[in-house]
Amino acid sequence: MPTLTRWTIRAAMIYLLVGLAAGALYWANAQWSLSPILSSLNPTYIHILVVGWLTQLIFGVIYWMFPIIRKDNMRGDPRLAWAVFGLLNAGLLLRIGCEPWRSVTPNDLNGMGLVLSALLQVVAGYLLILVCWPRVRARAGTGGA
Amino acid sequence: MPTLSRYFVRSALIYLGIGFTLGGFILAAKGGGADARFWLWLPTHIVFLLNGWLIQLSMGVAYWILPRIHLSDRGRQGWAWGGFVAFQLGLLLTLGTILSLWVPEVQSLFAPGLLLQTLGVFFFAIHALPRIRPALVRAASAP
């Protein structure tokens, strides 16, 4: 299993736990009115699960298991793949910080944080496609150096 | 990876890109950095990431790795291809609803799009059901 895959799967597992906990808190608050701040966890918890857990896990597994490009260039440029990991997590963490904050106290700082988060995640999505696209192939490439 | 799986997975990647783009505009609007009308794209954003990305990827990988019926025969391939075509048509109708920002009438394509996607999954399930079984591995030394 490549190093990048280990990092993405570990991060995905953490997001799964955090997302489930945040969702549970959100719905517990909806039922028992625990604290107004907890009502700000939606839709953040959904994105923690869909982006942080599912999409990141899928990316890590595709990077690991889809047919290789060539024996001398198995998974393409690793810097691009690491950029996906970095940008996706930076964007998502920024969202986790700014989105609930903005729903309680809207200001320029958390507004700019959300715009930056959007930009980081969209670029990460495009790079993810760039990294995965050449791996969607009939069979593993065999060309040697 | 068989041809149909490649089509499914490539399409899934394309809809991931579109879904992220729409989501980016919506999040930027939430931050005050974009037109608030982008919120109209929320249902399309959800459908593209759940159906266009996750469900399509699942079907593509399932077609590839589920146990085969016999040797290279995946069985009922017409149903799988029919599922792909119906799903794509449904996604194209959903794609059309992006224009609802400027032409509100096209929002009426949303429900037919979802129905076609559901039909696509139904067709694919007819293909896949017989393949959900233990893999038959023949020992190399068997007569």
Image (spheres, coloured by chain):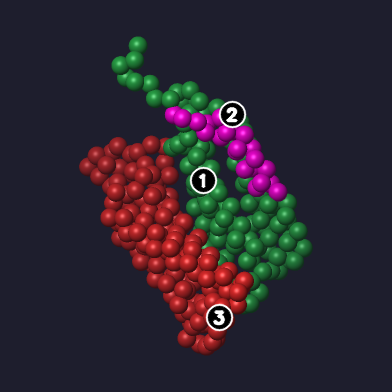
Instruction: Let me know if residue B126 is in the magenta part.
Output: yes
Q: Position of residue B139 (x, y in %)?
A: 34, 20
Furthest toward the front, the residue is: A32
Residue B77's x, y, as percent? 57, 30
Question: Which amino acid type is marked by label 3?
Answer: Ser
Mark 3 Cα shell of 10 Å, populated few (<14), some (14-19), many (≥20): few
Chain A appears in which tint?
Answer: red
Out of B122 and A135, give the one closest to the viewer.
Answer: B122
Q: Which residue is mark 2?
A: B76
Cβ–Cβ under 8 Å for marks 3 and 2: no
Judging from the image, what secondary structure is the residue with disc 1 in? helix
- Whether discs 3 and 2 lie on one chain: the answer is no
Question: What residue is rendered at 60% in x and 38% in y?
Answer: B124
* Residue linked to disc 1: B58
Magenta span contains residue A134: no
Q: Residue at x 48, y 79 (%)?
A: A98
**Residue A143 visible within the image:** yes
Secondary structure at numbered mark 2: loop
SS label for mark 3: loop
> Which x, y percent locates residue A85?
37, 62
Kindly check if marks 1 and 2 are in contact, taking CB atoms under 8 A apart as contact: no
Residue under label 3, please give it. A35
Label number found at residue A86: none
Horizontally, is B4 left or right of A72 in the view? right
N-terminal-most mark, 1 or 2: 1
Q: Chain of mark 3?
A: A
Range drawn in magenta = B115-135
For the N terminus of chain B, the quadrant is top left
